[in-house]
Image (cartoon, grey):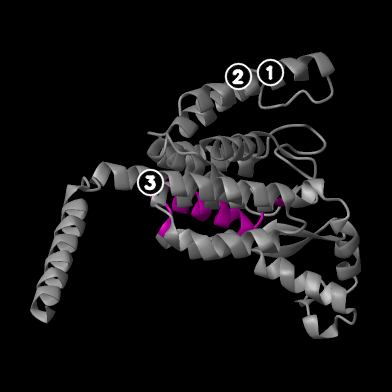
Amino acid sequence: MKKIMIFLLITVLSVTGILVGCTANDDPPVTEEENMFDEKADNEQILEEFRTLVAEADFPKSVVDYADEIVIDLDTETASVMIFELSQYLSEFFNYDTKMWDNMERLNVYYDYSEGIDEEKIKETDVKEFYYDLIDSGYKLVAMEGMLNPIVDYRWMAKYNEYISEDISDYFELCAIESDQLSAKDAALVISWDELGDRVLAAEKFLSEHSGSVAKGEVLYRYTRYLWMYMLGLNNTPTVEWETNKVKEEVLDSYNKFIEEHNDTISAEAVGNYIKLLSEIQFIIPYDNEEKYLDFDRSIDELIDNAKNSL
């Protein structure tokens, strides 16, 4: 009887093992295409969670912390979109959250124009925390018109380079040129005309190399701004002599050098056409004649639009 029971037990175990084995072997294998589909769905869900957090966050620090944690698990395409959107969010945050400017005013008290901010001197705990959160969120502080302004530190954004595509990495490098040294402050140019021309070229280079980039619109904006400043200057740094409205020799020298050294670029063609336009009016910009100036301004807009449309 004992032998019979042992035999039956062995038989049951064997049959169970066969059944389990058959069930496992009968399941169709997961294909590479299905794996890719699941991964893409996961990435899209994470991107949506990120966007929800952006919409609901009170301050960028929580958004940055989330991006830092999750970016290592994303594919390059999704990571690139997320980090680019993070940079836009950081850039625009203080435009819409006006209550944060109250904290900026309190922080401004501790700013020294020669030394910056010594955080050890900040007395209020909440102001000090606000300052640390700013820096940890990728901002740097610059003084403009007597007030501290937070701008995105694009050198800081480079910490994501290993996870993102080349075009977004190049976009951050282009923006870092500006965040390292602003081109203008207080309605005045703070770099040379030649340096401004270099920024025009850097933007053109990006657009020619990454025409399909998600960052194209942002770079076109920068390109337009740089080229416009190069042609007309700013209120406190005009391209003309104050008394005569005649274009300064140093500006014309920069234009001619720009064309000579970069004559195979779209921007050089635009600057060349601008010189022709100036020559037709004896290099005197008609600021004192509204009708003539409006015609002149429209011509500049057309030159810049033609350049943009060629990129």
Magenta-tinted stretch: 163-184
Dot 3: what SS?
helix
Secondary structure that dominates the magenta span: helix
The residue indicated by pointer 3 is 38
At which x and y percent is residue 120?
80, 85
The residue indicated by pointer 2 is 302
In the visual, does 183 lie left or right of 243? left
Q: Is residue 179 shown in magenta?
A: yes
> Distance from label 3 to label 2 (Cα)?
48 Å
Which residue is situated farthest in the front direction here? 1
In the visual, does 200 lie left or right of 120? left
Dot 2: what SS?
helix
The residue indicated by pointer 1 is 298
**Callout 1 environment at 10 Å: few (<14), some (14 to 19), or many (20+)?**
few
Visible residue check, residue 311: yes
At which x and y percent is residue 104?
85, 63
| Residue 179 in the image: above or below residue 126 | above
**Callout 3 environment at 10 Å: few (<14), some (14 to 19), or many (20+)?**
few
Q: Is residue 268 shown in magenta?
A: no
Q: How many marks?
A: 3
Instruction: Give amino acid for label 1.
Output: Arg
> Distance from label 3 to label 1 (Cα)?
52 Å
Badge 3 or badge 2: first in the primary sequence: 3
Dot 1: what SS?
helix
Nearer the observer, 208 or 172: 172
